[in-house]
Image (spheres, rainbow, N blue to C red):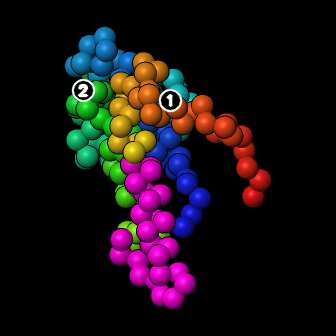
Amino acid sequence: MHTVHISAKADYGMRALLELTAAYRDNPKQLIKGEAISKAQDVPVKFLEGILRQLRQSGIVASQRGAEGGYRLDRSPNEVTIADVVRALDGPLAAVRGQRPEDVVYAGPSEHLREVWIAVRAAMRDVLEHITLADVASNDLPTTVAALLDEPGAWQRRSS
C-alpha cells in the first residue's frame, strides 16, 4: 500500500472546483474561463483543461464553448464531496497494488492484512465522503473531521 498520496490532479481539481464554488454562490449559472481559474490558483492551464474535462465527464462540472463560454458547477456545492472529486480524477480511494482491498488475498500470518487495508479505506471514506465543496469553501468542516485536526500530533510530520 502506498502512502496516502493526494495527486496533483486531485489537488488542482479541488482548487478549480473551489473557484467555481465561489462563483456559484454569486450566480449558479456564471461561467468562468479555464484561464481565469488557472491564474487564480496558479495551475498550469493545459493540465487544468484536462482535469476540467474529466470533471465534466463525471457530471460535476458543466462547460460551454465560445467567446462567452467557460465552466461552472453542474451540481450544488452542497452535493459534491471530496470523495466524488478524487474518484472522478484518480479512481478508487484506496487500492493495494492496483486492486481493491477486498479483492486482495493473503496467506499465513498475513491472512488478516486485508482487513487493515479495508479499515484504512473506511477511514478515508469517513472523512472524504462527509466534506462537500461548500464545507471547504465556507470553512465549515463536520465536527468529526474538525476533531481530527485537534488530535495530538495531527499537524506534526513523522520521520520516514
Magenta part mainly helix, strand or loop?
Answer: helix
Q: Dot 1: within a 10 Å radius of its alpha carbon, few (fewer than 14), some, or many (20 or more) residues? A: few
Mark 1 vs 2, N-terminal side: 2
Q: Amino acid at mark 1?
A: Ala
Q: Secondary structure at mark 1?
A: helix
* Number of numbered discs visible in the structure rendering: 2
Q: Dot 2: within a 10 Å radius of its alpha carbon, few (fewer than 14), some, or many (20 or more) residues? A: some
- In magenta segment, residue 5: no
State the image coordinates of residue 119 (x, y, percent, origin top left): 44, 59
Tell me the distance, in whole angstroms, between the alpha carbons under discs 1 and 2. 23 Å
Tell me what residue is drawn at x 66 percent, y 37 percent.
Answer: 152
Tell me, yes or no, if residue 45 can be seen here.
Answer: no
Q: Which residue is mark 2?
A: 76
Q: Amino acid at mark 2?
A: Ser
| 84 or 101: nearer the viewer | 101
Is residue 44 positioned above or below 40 on the image? below
Which residues fall within the magenta stretch? Answer: 102-125
Q: Which residue is mark 1?
A: 146
| Residues at discs 1 and 2 in contact (Cβ within 8 Å) | no
Is residue 56 positioned above or below 91 on the image? above
User: In the figure, residue 122 lies in which quadrant?
Assistant: bottom left
